[in-house]
Image: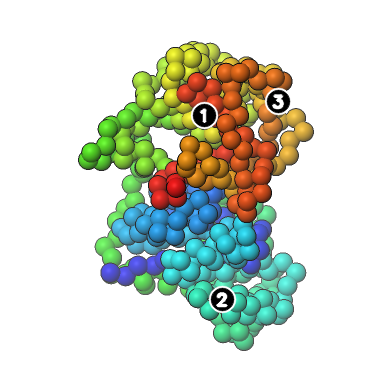
Amino acid sequence: MAKFNLLIGAATSGCGKTTFTMGLLRVLRDRGLRVQPFKCGPDYIDPLFHHQASGVESVNLDTFMSSPEHVRELFHHYGDDADVCVIEGAMGLFDGYDGSRGSAAEVAMLLDVPVLLLVNARAVAYSVAPLIHGFRHFNPALRLAGVVFNFVASDRQLATLRRACEDVGVPCMGSLPRCEALAIPSRHLGLTIEERDRMEQLIQRADEVVKKGASSLLASACEASNNIQRATISEPTSSDSVSSHSHGVVSKTFAIARDAAFNFTYRANLDALRARGTIHFFSPLHDHELPACDLLYLPGGYPELFAQELAANQPMRQAIRDYAEAGGHIVAECGGFMYLCHDIDGVPMCDVLPMSATMQGARLHLGYRKMQWNGSLFKGHEFHYSTIREESLPSTVERICLQQRATGEDVETPLYKYKNVLAGYTHWYWADRTTLS
């Protein structure tokens, strides 16, 4: 059975990968193809954009947080029933956490997926030839399918860029014009109904540009999938409760926060929980009761943008505080961690942890993290601008371990423990059990 797989890589960051990927996903979906999106690396935001563009939840493929075997299993598990698998890369094609380790190129070679190289054509002409030559020959194991030029200023420039491709022997599979309307104005897009409408307008514009500017790429995708019966993609279930039980595993119930304030999750993590029991999604913004559960999971998101609304829902804040004080098991990451604090810049939160979160003096904390705890190695990713103010922690709150970067250096990113509450800034990846030693 024919299948079209493609990784969208870029020469550098800022080439427009996400916008191009969204447009491509929408075009392929609208042509009746079953599309499965993926994202290289630990990013939790781009997969939300993929979902809106394609109607299908995206899956992260990360070679630091999980083993090569797990990455292959994910790709086949989620992609085998699709007509087209589109993987969006991260940063430049060979940019990883340690040289090219953890890069999009590593994922492409691991899965033997061809790469479409997106090149920023601003202020470049025939000198793009040695750049493309370098990407083609730097690692013989990488399959470069072709190039798409973005931000092209004129037909004259495009003719020169096409000649550069011909002289290097790499197909030019399309071009996109300079268009300020295609820039993603905010990483917060899609959080509210109003923002989702703005994102939908952006996706529709990207759809039109990709249809016009990447016709040869689209023709290749459709030709490779032309013997597959086309099917209409349906929206994933909106049910509040989804369950899938594994034989021989004691069934558990998991309550997971999911709304505009809390939405940074990995699909494979949630499916790993589904394999062990039942998931109940709830909204700290709008619901007033906490679902009965064996474990409460508060993922990351943007609680600082919805601090007043979260504070106004006093019944939910009280329910979570009561659950924690009664010994309930809670895992809170980043935004969920901030929600458990006494306040965010003076706005009251759940007051489970006697500390304050603040956006004052905001600076980016970013990078892979790992830690040894209880005899196991855990891996994850840290991404936040806020900081935590802790005056003097009571003896009931512990800093239980220190974390490290991917390359082994210590970082001041603690994991806090209070009763049966585990909370900190790192987003942990637990779907790959083989990485836990």
Residue marked by disc 1 = 422
Question: Which callout, 2 or 1, points to the residue nearer the camera?
Answer: 1
Question: Which callout, 3 or 1, points to the residue nearer the camera?
Answer: 1
Q: Residue furthest front?
A: 375
What amino acid is labelled 2 in the image?
A: Asn
Q: Is residue 398 above or below residue 50?
A: above
Question: Gap between marks 2 and 1, in whole Å?
Answer: 43 Å
Q: Is residue 340 above or below residue 58?
A: above
- Sequence-wise, the earlier of marks 2 and 1 is 2
Q: How many marks?
A: 3
- Sequence-wise, the earlier of marks 3 and 1 is 3
Residue 64 image offset from top left, x and y in percent: 53, 54
* Residue 389 circle label: 3
Residue 38 image offset from top left, x and y in percent: 46, 55
Structural crowding at the residue carrying mark 1, measured as other residues with C-alpha within 10 Å and reported as few (<14), some (14–19) or many (≥20):
some
* Residue 139 circle label: 2
Residue 286 image offset from top left, x and y in percent: 48, 21
Contact (Cβ within 8 Å) of mark 3 with mark 1: no
What amino acid is labelled 3 in the image?
A: Arg
| 206 and 165: which is toward the camera | 165
